[in-house]
Amino acid sequence: MAKLIKILVFYTLFIKAGFAQDVCPPNNLTVTPGVGTISVTWENPGFYYGTHEVSPQGFNYHTGSVDSVSGFTQNSRIKGGNQEQGWAMFDISVLPSGQEPITVEFNFYVYGTNWPYWSVTPVTSNPLTTDHAVLYNDIVAGAGSNSNNDYGTFNEEESFPPGPYSYSLIGSVFEDIASTSLTQDWFT
């Protein structure tokens, strides 16, 4: 990713949960057999609906940039170019555990561009505890134009201006967030 967007400060994911797979099991299920009939009673807990805004925490290394030579090049912003790769580590502790979202919106602010092209990819490494080389390789492994692993690849025009943006993410991001929320409270 030689020419990348410079992104700073404003990263949020809007995660909307609620569809048929989110039906909660019935409460107080009772089955009473009878002669020629069966009586079934239960309380319907319904569906879980909600929109959650999750963001990186405001501490160093919850967002940042890394390259393969210098190591960590930014500890609180994503900067692209010169082989730098960026990440954002979202606090997902407010999400219902195991709930699969139906939409994920990635919100960000662009401060400067030069023919930007970039992708949002899964990263399993924890930027707070992972060596810079491992983190860099983890990011690069998921990167690539229209990769089967990415959550979205974006090839912007030369005239792409700085400002706020919001893109819907695709791919396995829905399943990945749901499975990650079962074991940890962060998603990178």
Image: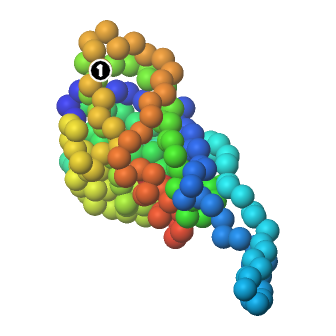
Q: Which amino acid, mark 1?
A: Glu
Residue ID at (37%, 61%) = 125
Q: Is residue 33 left or right of residue 12?
A: right
Q: Nearer the viewer, residue 184 or 61?
A: 184
* Relative image position of residue 131 (x, y in whole percent): 33, 61
Helix, strand or loop for disc 1: loop
Observer able to see residue 4: no
Rendered image quadrant of residue 77: top left
Name the quadrant of the N terminus.
top left
* Relative image position of residue 67 (x, y in whole percent): 26, 45
* Relative image position of residue 7 (x, y in whole percent): 42, 30
Q: Is residue 110 above or below residue 106?
A: above
Q: Nearer the viewer, residue 108 or 29?
A: 29
Residue ID at (51%, 32%) = 107
Q: Is residue 99 left or right of residue 33?
A: left
What residue is shown with label 1?
156
Q: Residue furthest top?
A: 159
Observer able to see residue 138: yes
* Relative image position of residue 171 (x, y in whole percent): 35, 47
Colouring rule applied to residues: rainbow
Residue ID at (26%, 12%) = 158
Q: Is residue 120 above or below residue 95?
A: above
Q: Nearer the viewer, residue 18 or 121?
A: 18
Residue ID at (38%, 19%) = 112
Q: Residues within 10 Å of mark 1 (few under 14, many from 20)?
A: some
